Image (tube, rainbow, N blue to C red):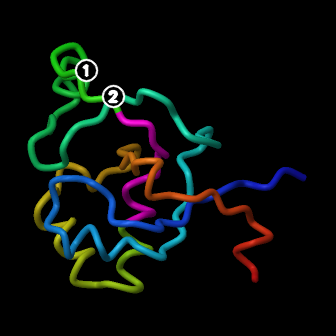
Amino acid sequence: MSIMPSIRIVGIPPGEAPEEIRRAWIGLILPLMPGGYGLRNSWASFGVLTGPKSCLGLLVMPLLRRNRTDGYVVPVLDAVAILEGQHPNAAKWWRENVPHMMKAGRAFVFDGSVCELVYEDEEAN
């Protein structure tokens, strides 16, 4: 039986959302994207407010931008649902301000410096 790791947010993630919205992630345990079992080096990243909003933009933007993040990839819908349980106003901010991200298959990349890996056994404790 393999244990699926998750991440715990231990610091304020960098990003374009207001600080109080980013601060709301601290302490939450979030699942990694299927197949994303660890830190991804040099992941192409975009701001949630200024990044691409269409599939075409997602294909073209990596060619135009040089932003790279060493981070963990988390499904947006799962992350926002978990956030909703602890900080409903922060989850509401995400749904209202970045509706283009609220789709199956979309992902947040949490900077590795504000995350720690958590394994299933640790979550039960």
Q: Give the x, y percent position of residue 124.
A: 75, 79
- Judged by its main secondary structure, the magenta piece is strand
Give the residue pinned by disc 2. 44
Residue depicted at 37% across the width and 55% down the height: 76
Kindly identify the amino acid type of the residue bearing the numbered disc 2: Ala
Above or below 33: residue 102: below
Q: CA distance from mark 1 to mark 2?
A: 6 Å
Q: Is residue 48 above or below residue 84?
A: above
Q: Is residue 71 shown left or right of residue 88?
A: right
Q: Residue furthest top?
A: 63
Q: Which residues are magenta?
A: 69-79
Residue 95 part of the magenta-drawn span:
no
Q: Quadrant of residue 6?
A: bottom right
Q: Give the structural element (helix, strand or loop) at label 1.
A: helix
Q: Earlier in the sequence, mark 1 or mark 2?
A: 2
Foreground residue among 19 and 57: 19
**On the image, which quarter does residue 90 sit in?**
bottom left
> Which SS class for mark 2?
strand
Q: Are marks 1 and 2 in contact (CB under 8 Å)?
A: yes
